[in-house]
Amino acid sequence: MESSSLRERQKERRRARIYTVAIDLFKQGGFQATTATDIARASNVSRGTFFNYYPYKEAVLLDYGSEVVEGLRLHAEQQLLAGAAPMMVLQDVWMRLAEQNMLERDLIPPLAYEVLNPDPERARTAYQALPLGKVIEMILRPMHHSGQLRADLSLSRMSNLIADTYLMIALRWSAYGSERSLKEEMRLTLAFLMDGVLRR
């Protein structure tokens, strides 16, 4: 039992080391220029060992994105429990996400493309790893319960549409640029989206 537990801890430490090294390499040299071999070598593991933990290079980014979304979820939950208005919480989370994406601009396209991957299994894995729609649903639930949101679409559908729009705007901004900052793009986009989900 003890040896099994030790093996599990060693595996967790190895995975954490591979993840940390990979993200550092992506930030230093760019995602596209960094290979699985580069990550394995810098992590002091074999290429095969890397693939035992991450079946493809983009899977590392899913762990990164999952951490970001979980941080946003915890922040939103705290704000809501403290009595903040859902719209203020959504705007705050939206801007925090934009700030993170501006800092890591090169990581947005491969992360977004993974959600749009033509391989349905990989797209599903990415969607599950990045539950931004669930965070938005949690934030908007009080507004839904009080009848402030339109009734012809489910809360889940509206939340996922908002999350999907964020992803597409962030992808376009990072890949093609804009005369506006991502925060300004997102502020305008959120205002437009919320106009569509509020009950008339």
Image (cartoon, rainbow, N blue to C red):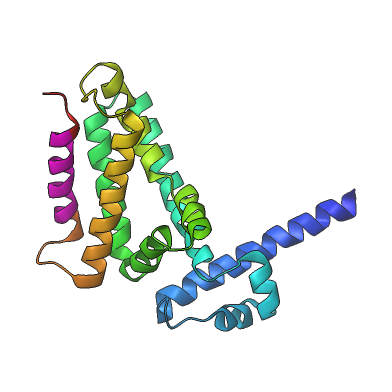
Q: Which residue is drawn at 45% across and 45% down?
A: 70
Whether residue 45 is visible, yes or no, is: no
Compare residues 13 and 116 and report the one nearer the observer.
116
Residue 195 in the magenta stretch? The answer is yes
Q: Position of residue 34 (x, y in %)?
A: 48, 81
Residue 105 in the magenta stretch? The answer is no
On screen, residue 26 versus residue 48, left or right, reads left
Q: Position of residue 49 (x, y in %)?
A: 70, 73
For the C terminus, which image quadrant?
top left
In this rendering, is residue 166 above or below 158?
below
Whether residue 197 is visible, yes or no, is: yes
Residue furthest out toward the top: 146
Prevailing secondary structure of the magenta residues = helix
Q: Which residue is drawn at 64% across and 71% down?
A: 51
In this rendering, is residue 77 above or below 26?
above
Which image quadrant is residue 19 in?
A: bottom right
Q: Where is residue 113 in the image (x, y as percent from the top left)?
A: 38, 64
In this rendering, is residue 48 above or below 77?
below
Q: How many labels does the image show?
A: 0
Q: Position of residue 112 (x, y in %)?
A: 36, 61
Q: Which residue is drawn at 27% across and 27% down?
A: 84
On screen, residue 95 versus residue 43, left or right, reads left
In this rendering, is residue 28 above or below 92?
below
Q: Which residue is drawn at 9% across and 66% down?
A: 179
Which residues are drawn in magenta? Answer: 184-196
